[in-house]
Every structure is written in structure tokens, then in C-alpha cells.
Amino acid sequence: MLLTSKMAATKFGDPATERHMVLWDVPADLEIGVIPKRIYCNRALIKPLEKAFIALIKTGAVKELKTWDGCFNIRKQRGSLFSASLHSWGLAIDLNAAWNGLGKEPTLSDQFVSCFTDNGFDWGGYWQRPDGMHFQLKGELI
């Protein structure tokens, strides 16, 4: 089930209150390449993100990770006047943004994408208007 801002608002409330946000100290063995040492995110994101990072390292796909482009950012969804972005609740991340812009053909390998989709994320690269930089928590995990 694709997570929506309505679902996030129902579960977590107003993103400005930040009640479910934490500063996650990424385990040292996962700090490879541009994987950050600390990530400000929703608590619900930690376990799936940790599993995805482990998969990136284990498969060698971590070598494709060029940039960490963020997680938490209170803002509207691009192209929407009303819906908040899932980044507003710290439930989505952006990676390799310069090479995977909104509406452009994604450049991430299937192996890289699987490291996330097999571990609790939906990928924006599969959408009708691709957003290849965007990974968000699956709806059933909140």
C-alpha cells in the first residue's frame, strides 16, 4: 500500500510538532561512502533504512550512492497546493538527486533499488511521473 500524506497525518499528526522524529546515530559499520553518520528522521524509518543500508553494503551497490540529499523537510508535495510531502514527517529520503530528477528517467540499477524495495520502501522511479531520487516508507509499515 502506497503511503500518502493523509495516512501520515492520521498516524503522526501535524509534522511541525515533530513528536515522532529522532536523530538516529547510524551504526559505525554502516557509515560507508556518503551514508550519513546521523539522520534526523521518523522513528518508523530507522529499521527499514538500516536494513536497506546493510543490503547496499552487502551487495556492493553502495558504490552507486553518490549523494545523500535529505530526509526531513516540512514542505508541500511538488506540484500540489495542499498535500504535504512525506519528507515533512521524515518518512522519505532522496538519493543521487542530481542524476534522478523528477520526471526524468532514473539512473539507479535494479540491484540498488531492490536494496530499498526489499526492505520496506516504495521507489518513486516506478511512478507514472518518475521521481528516481525518492524512496518512501511502505504504507503498511506505519
Image (cartoon, rainbow, N blue to C red):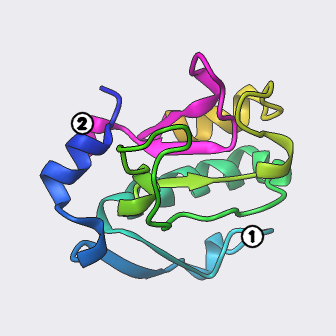
Q: Position of residue 63 (x, y in %)?
A: 85, 53
Whole-angstrom CA distance, mark 2 to mark 1, is: 29 Å
Q: Is residue 90 visible?
A: yes
Question: SS class of the residue under badge 2?
Answer: helix
Q: Given the image, on which type of amino acid does mark 1 rest? A: Ile
Q: Which mark is residue 32?
A: 1
Residue position marked by numbered label 2 in the rendering: 140
Q: From where the camera sits, is residue 142 visible? A: no
Q: Give the x, y percent position of residue 68.
A: 71, 63
Q: Quadrant of the N terminus?
A: top left
| Location of residue 69 in the rendering, given as x and y in whole percent from the top left corner | 69, 62
Picture mark count: 2
Q: Which residues are magenta?
A: 118-142
Residue at the spot 58% in from the left edge and 32% down from the top edge: 124
Find out whether the residues at labels 2 and 1 contact each other: C-beta distance under 8 Å: no
Q: Residue at x 35, y 61 (%)?
A: 89
Quadrant in the rendering for residue 26: bottom right
Side of 47 relative to 106 (left or right)? left
| Magenta region includes residue 137 | yes
Decide which of 22, 51 is in the foreground and name it.
22
Residue found 78% across the figure and 30% down from its top: 106
Horizontal side, residue 93 vs residue 68: left or right: left
SS under mark 1: loop
> As displayed, is residue 12 above or below residue 110?
below
The amino acid type, in three-letter code, at marker 2 is Glu
Q: Which one is earlier in the sequence, the residue at label 2 or at label 1?
A: 1
Position of 20 with respect to 51 (left or right) is: left
